[in-house]
Amino acid sequence: MSRNSPGLAVVLLSGGLDSAVALYVAREKGYGVHALSFDYGQRHRKELDCAEMIACKSGSQWHRIRLEFPWKGSSLLDKNQAVPQEFSGGKIPSTYVPGRNIVFLSFAASLAETLGAGTVFIGANEIDYSGYPDCRKDFLQAFQTALNLGTRTGVEARGIRIEAPLIRKTKAGIIRLGMKLGVPFEFTWSCYNGRTRACGTCDSCRFRAAGFARAGIEDPAL
Ligand code: ZN
């Protein structure tokens, strides 16, 4: 890292499109990146394979945490529940995982504090999204305050900043930014269903397809 480097950052990396772009934003800003992914009982391992590939391609360190939500509470985690195939239309869909970003950001903050990293990047977005409350700017700001009240670095040193560079962007805007930064979109996976090909009808597939269409770019993952 050069003398002018902003230091280390922890990036939450799911293997989806948004988190991949957030990682490349962090790299562009000169951070040394530790990417953090979770094997948390999601329906398929495809996005984890993508996360590993993206971390590797971008020259980042990759950490994978295995954890469980034994109570499930989400159609993403419970194989007895179907993932909705119709657009949720503003209501929080059953794919919401209770407390997911609270849990993930807590791990990211713990890793950041241990490494001496001052920044945690998250690809959260509150424009073209499914209405998950833990993806909103207000939550992220409040959580940053909580982190700095509850960590040693917050009390004795510079603390931890949560950066959500995509929070107010449209999906098309995120895709255009990713193209500019050289994000290998062919190695990102958005579909909630872990089939060989994306289903094309879940919320996540719909947002992705509409984003690529609006950006006027063909989705290299298809
Ligand atoms: Zn899908």
Image: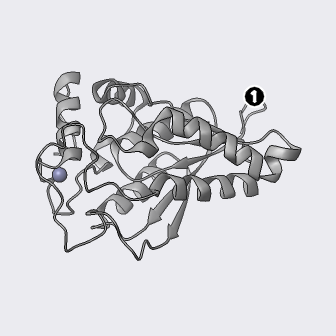
Q: Is residue 177 above or below residue 82?
A: above
Q: Quadrant of residue 148?
A: top right
Disc 1 residue: CB within 8 Å of ligand 1: no
Q: Quadrant of residue 18?
A: top left
Which is more toward the observer, 50 or 1? 50
List the single residue furthest toward the bottom. Answer: 70
Residue 70 pos. (x, y %):
41, 77
Q: Is residue 219 left or right of residue 18?
A: left
Residue 119 pos. (x, y %):
66, 40
At 28% from the left edge and 26% from the top edge, which residue is drawn? 172
Residue type marked 1: Asn
Disc 1: which residue: 4
Number of marks in picture: 1
List the single residue furthest toward the front. Answer: 91
Q: Is residue 86 left or right of residue 162?
A: left
Residue 103 pos. (x, y %):
53, 59
Q: Is residue 172 above or below residue 150?
A: above
Which is more toward the observer, 80 or 185? 80
Q: Is residue 139 left or right of residue 184?
A: right
Q: Quadrant of residue 97?
A: bottom left
Which is more toward the observer, 167 or 38? 167
Q: Is residue 112 above or below residue 141?
A: below
At 61% from the left edge and 44% from the top edge, which residue is drawn? 143
* Disc 1 secondary structure class: loop
**Quarter of the figure with the N terminus:** top right
Q: How is the image coloured?
A: one colour
